[in-house]
Image (tube, helix red, strand yellow):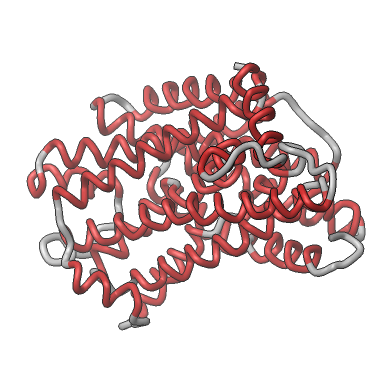
Amino acid sequence: MAGATHRTELAAREALSGQRKGLSALLPFVGPAVIASVAYMDPGNFATNIQAGSTCGYELLWVVVLASVAAMLFQAMSAKLGIVTGSNLAELCREQFPKPVVLGMWCASEVAAMATDIAEFLGGALGFSLLFHVSILFGLVVTGVVTSAILLLDKGGFRPIEIVIALLVAAIGLSYVCELAIAPPDWHAALAGSVLPRLHGTTAVTLAVGIIGATIMPHTLYLHSGLTQNRTPARNDGERRQLLAFSNREVLVALGIAGFVNLAMVMMFASVFSKSEPGIADISVAYHALVPLLGVGAATVFLISLMASGISSSVVGTMAGQVVMQGFVNLRIPVWARRVVTMIPAFVIGLHFDVVGAMVMSQVVLSFILPLPLIALVVLSSRRAVM
């Protein structure tokens, strides 16, 4: 495992020195944005996209496009902060802002990271439960074991966990390529919905806000800067400019794929449900409705994508929590301890409360906390002394 990281580091140095060109030069730098992109395809997105497509058809695709473009901008800024300064967003907040502000941001960021992780954990468990017809408790246990095993790959360096996350992202993307082939959308209406801003009624406005809240995630802004800060340290300004160029290309590709997945989700459910089953908001209801409409195959592919989303985004949520805690208060706890801390409330919610309702509430929490890292990122990126 450590060998993969070492080979990637050597390849990155070869690319910076001009020995690699084209795609061969870019590949060693692919990883941070792929990991960050997972948050833009998490189970919270599934819930909002299902409801947006089934309720408003293709009308809200332009919101997905705008949210994806905004995500690219902010993730590129986060990556740039880590590359240029050698510090992550949370560390810079601790250094640059007053202590009371730092403590407040830390508490809010921990709440956001935990709320996100709980929702993603529940999403993966729900996918297992529906696909294999087992209890939600069994799904929670399996999801906990799988995510914990993936997190342990971090001991072998950054590359193994990046590869696993990339494979899960590929599974999500391929799932929706298949879904669009099974349920072709009205491409003319989809194109119009992607470029013409329309909001008909309060429901559409609410769903538009929900799409934005589910797309741009606070914890990934901290995590992305943490993933780039020491991955391939720049030795001079020339290398720093090269690293920024490679990072921006990766952000465009990785976040572009995430945007495609969200567009495909909305288009699929607009095509399938907007007329036959309008207003569906529950993931399990959507799955059961897909079976008679498109067949078991399409419903199974949907659940596979949900499981891949829940597992990968839960891993990323735990990683982000580590960056937040270490950056704001210079405290690091074992990753298994953080995994347990977020698993306990997930078990309680999964066994005693409405799983989908809890996932939706997590998006509400995130929408209130999102402005904090966004403002901090803009302020710090504009300070000449920092950059």
The quadrant of the picture occupied by the C terminus is bottom right
Q: Quick check: 92 left or right of 222?
A: right
The number of numbered badges drawn on the structure is: 0
Classify 43 as above or below 135.
below
Q: Quadrant of residue 71 in the image?
A: bottom right
Residue at horizontal 35 percent and vertical 77 percent from the top: 195
Residue at horizontal 75 percent and vertical 49 percent from the top: 82
Task: Give the image location of residue 162, x and y in percent.
Answer: 55, 32
Q: Quick check: 267 left or right of 25?
A: left
The quadrant of the picture occupied by the N terminus is top right
Nearest to the observer: residue 165 or residue 309:
165
Nearest to the observer: residue 354 or residue 248:
248
Classify 26 as above or below 332.
below
Task: Give the image location of residue 217, x and y in percent.
Answer: 57, 55
Residue at horizontal 39 percent and vertical 35 percent from the top: 308
Q: Quadrant of residue 139 in the image?
A: top left
Task: Give the image location of residue 222, x and y in percent.
Answer: 69, 49
Residue at horizontal 78 percent and vertical 64 percent from the top: 381
Q: Give the residue at the far front of this rendering.
A: 19
Q: Quadrant of residue 4 in the image?
A: top right
- Is residue 181 visible in the rendered image? The answer is yes
Nearest to the observer: residue 68 or residue 25:
25
- Is residue 109 visible in the rendered image? The answer is no
Task: Give the image location of residue 123, x and y in percent.
Answer: 41, 40
